[in-house]
Each structure stands twice: as structure tokens, then as C-alpha cells.
Image (spheres, rainbow, N blue to C red):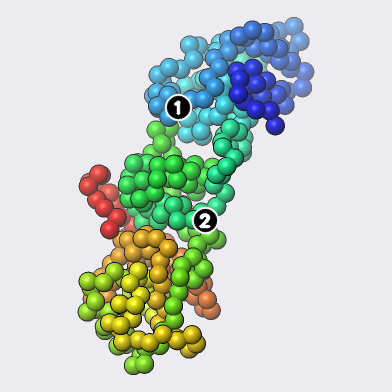
């Protein structure tokens, strides 16, 4: 694959893309700063406006109709145009070609109309850290914010609420936009999120038992006593998940195991009066691999319960009947949709 380190390389790549999408009999020539498209004895000559890379700030200006190419006789050539910006440029009647294969050309004499939405991403994206899944803590943090909070969401909101780095947040958002799970405006605002598809995708990468450290315990006096004692340990950091937690939203099956996230396993086990066992346990204490599992919790009858989005992914990735319970909970979430948080006062709400 040709690198895009120079203006010449960029023009060559876009010319190749343009030629492969033009009707039969249309020829393309490049001379100096011009590009001609010809059919028969008619030719239209574009002046080339080559912009190697368009910064986020420059994208915002273009989306507002500022710094657009001077006229319809100008062809914007660049490395990559995000989908929201491409839509705005089409509205403004801007002719463009990018190195990913996205094209918008409308010429009246000769009549040539080409509109291509390529599936490729930015061809110059660094190869060292591509996001091809939602594996890892940073992607999970971003995912939980997108699941829990209503759109629209500023990127700054996503970064602040998730605690992910700016780079990690942008990688995850770019990936989710490319596969169609979220939509973003030309300013970068997350305008919509298909949370059900996002939850399903996340369940391929995160697992309640595979992503965290698990210890098994026996509650000698049964789960009723465990639930009762959880009400008296509010000073400890914990969140109930799994079947017993889901019953607060949608009771699907009887719960025979209490599953609790906590970074304080030894202290919580002591306070609950349970003993560790390698077999036959009815309490699982989970040391979470991050803090997102303990965010946006809700109190039910004195017991701190994980966010419904977290419960859902835990059930979908859990053992035995858990996945079926998870599907039932997702159906409930679709019917209600009142579990998502609306950011009424941006900049002041925390994810705690």
C-alpha cells in the first residue's frame, strides 16, 4: 500500500480511487494543480485543493460552511473525511475525494455524477494500536458511559465520566462510529447510540468471570442472611450483580448464587460471615479489574446494586442459565428505557 507522506502520494491515491469509480469512457488527467475529467470531446477541469490532513478544528469550520473550497470548480482532496463531515460537504455541494475512497463529484458539462461511501477507515491511522474490539479497561469504561447516559454526549462528557484517556476515548468512539453503533455530528458530538447492539458487542469482549479475579465462598446460613448483612456494610465498596441483582428489575429465575463486586474481598467476606471454598460455593466475590463496575449503582431495599447495564453484560457472559436471564433483562431494558441517565447539568455530574 502506498504511503501518504507527500502531496503527490495523496493525489495519486485519490486519482486511482476516482478512476475505479468513474463510468466507462471517462478519462482523468492530472497536470500541476489541476485535475481534468473528460468524456468524448468534453472536459471539465478542477482546481485541486489538497489538504493532507484536516484537524478536528478545521473539520468543525468546514461543517459550519467556513473555509470551504472556493467554488464548485474546486476538488477537495484529502486523506480522510469522517462520515458526518462528508454529509455536510454534500449538503454544501462540495466536490471531494479522499484516500479512503469516499467520493462526491457533480459535473454538469460533461454530465458526471459520482457519489461513493467507502467502508474503509482513515488509511493513515497508526497501525500500532488499532481498535478492532471493545477489549480492555479503557474501551469498557467508554462503553459503560455510552450505555448508561442518554445522548447527545460531548466527547468531553465521555472522557470525564469514563475516566478514560482522551486518546482511548477517541479510539473507541471512532471504532463504534465506523461500525455504525454510534452516530456523531460533524462537531464530534455523539448524537445517537444503539445501546442494545453496543451491549451485545461488549459481551464479546468483557466477561464477568473472565475479566476479573474471582473468589468463591460458602454462606453457611444461606443467601437471605447474606442479603441482610449487605445492608449493614454500606461503608464498604461493593455492588451486587447477577441474578439476585436483576430481580430488582426483571425477575426471571430463582437465584442460587450471590455475585458481588468489591475491591475489599477479605473485609467483606469477614463482615458477611462467609468462608472461602474451592467447591460448592454460593457466594462469588469479584475483585473488579477497574472501577466502572461500581459506578452508577442503585440502592434497593438497603442493598447496593450494580447499574442495570453492568448486570446485563454480567448475565450475558455468565455460566448456566445466566445468558437467558440476560436476554430477558435486555428485553425489559428495551421496554422501559428509563434506566438511562440524562445529563441535565453538563460539567457538574459525576459518574460515581
Q: What residue lies at 27% left-to-right and 79% top-to-bottom? A: 230
For mark 2, what is the residue?
Answer: 135
Point out the tag, 2 or 1, that comes first from the N-terminus. Answer: 1
Q: Is residue 127 left or right of residue 165?
A: right
60 vs 168: above or below:
above
Q: Looking at this view, is 123 or 41 the one in front?
A: 123
Counting from the top left corner in percent of width and height, residue 105 is at 60, 21
Q: In which quarter of the image is residue 244?
A: bottom left
216 horizontally vs 118: left or right: left
**Residue in the image at 61% along x and 9% along y:** 33
Which quarter of the rendering shows the N terminus?
Answer: top right
Q: Where is residue 89 in the image (x, y as percent from the top left)?
A: 49, 25
Is 23 above or below relative to 163?
A: above
Q: The C terminus appears in which quarter of the rendering?
A: bottom left
Q: Where is residue 96 in the image (x, y as percent from the top left)?
A: 56, 22
Residue at the far front in the pictured view:
266
From the image, tell me which residue sits under label 1: 55
Residue 262 vs residue 34, the one in the foreground:
262
In depth, the one of 322 and 95 nearer the eye is: 322
Q: Position of residue 4 (x, y in %)?
A: 62, 25
Q: Which residue is located at x 26 percent, y 53 percent?
A: 350
At a point 27% along the width and 75% down the height, the residue shown is: 303
In the picture, residue 42 is in which quadrant? top right
- Count of numbered badges drawn on the protein: 2
Asked which secondary structure carries label 1, the reply is loop
Instruction: Measure how far apart labels 2 and 1 are at the Cα level.
Output: 28 Å
Q: Categorize mark 1 by other alpha carbons within 10 Å: few (<14), some (14-19), many (20+).
A: few
Can residue 32 be seen? yes
Mark 2 secondary-structure assignment: loop
Q: Looking at the rendered structure, which numbered label has been put on residue 299?
A: none
Amino acid at each position: 500500500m502506498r504511503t501518504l507522506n507527500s502531496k503527490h502520494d495523496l493525489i495519486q491515491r485519490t486519482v486511482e480511487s476516482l478512476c475505479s469509480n468513474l463510468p466507462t469512457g471517462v478519462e482523468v488527467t492530472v497536470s500541476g494543480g489541476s485535475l481534468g475529467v473528460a468524456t468524448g470531446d468534453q472536459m471539465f477541469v478542477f482546481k485541486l485543493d489538497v489538504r493532507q490532513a484536516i484537524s478536528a478544528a478545521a473539520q468543525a469550520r468546514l461543517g459550519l460552511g467556513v473555509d470551504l473550497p472556493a467554488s464548485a470548480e474546486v476538488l477537495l482532496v484529502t486523506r480522510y473525511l469522517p462520515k458526518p463531515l462528508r454529509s455536510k460537504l454534500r449538503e454544501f455541494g462540495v466536490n471531494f475525494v479522499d484516500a479512503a475512497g469516499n467520493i462526491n463529484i457533480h459535473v454538469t458539462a460533461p454530465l458526471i455524477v459520482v457519489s461513493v461511501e467507502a467502508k474503509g477507515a482513515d488509511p493513515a491511522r497508526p497501525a500500532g494500536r488499532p481498535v478492532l474490539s471493545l477489549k480492555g479497561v479503557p474501551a469498557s469504561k467508554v462503553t459503560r458511559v455510552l450505555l448508561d447516559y442518554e445522548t447527545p454526549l460531548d466527547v468531553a462528557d465521555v472522557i470525564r465520566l469514563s475516566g478514560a484517556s482522551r486518546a482511548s476515548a477517541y479510539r473507541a468512539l471512532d471504532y463504534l462510529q465506523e461500525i455504525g453503533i454510534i452516530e456523531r455530528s460533524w462537531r464530534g458530538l455523539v448524537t445517537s447510540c444503539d445501546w442494545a447492539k453496543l451491549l451485545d458487542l461488549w459481551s464479546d469482549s468483557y466477561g464477568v468471570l473472565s475479566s476479573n479475579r474471582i473468589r468463591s465462598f460458602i454462606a453457611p446460613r444461606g443467601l437471605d442472611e447474606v442479603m441482610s448483612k449487605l445492608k449493614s456494610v454500606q461503608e464498604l465498596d461493593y455492588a451486587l450483580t447477577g441474578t439476585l441483582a436483576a430481580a430488582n428489575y426483571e425477575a426471571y429465575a430463582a437465584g442460587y448464587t450471590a455475585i458481588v463486586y468489591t475491591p475489599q474481598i477479605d473485609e467483606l467476606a469477614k463482615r458477611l460471615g462467609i468462608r472461602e471454598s474451592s467447591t460448592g460455593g454460593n457466594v462469588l466475590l469479584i475483585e473488579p479489574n477497574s472501577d466502572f463496575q461500581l459506578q452508577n449503582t442503585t440502592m434497593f431495599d438497603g442493598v447496593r446494586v450494580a447499574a442495570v447495564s453492568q448486570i446485563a453484560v454480567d448475565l450475558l457472559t455468565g455460566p448456566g442459565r445466566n445468558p437467558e436471564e440476560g436476554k430477558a433483562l435486555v428485553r425489559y431494558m428495551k421496554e422501559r428505557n428509563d434506566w438511562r441517565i440524562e445529563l441535565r447539568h453538563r460539567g457538574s455530574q459525576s459518574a460515581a
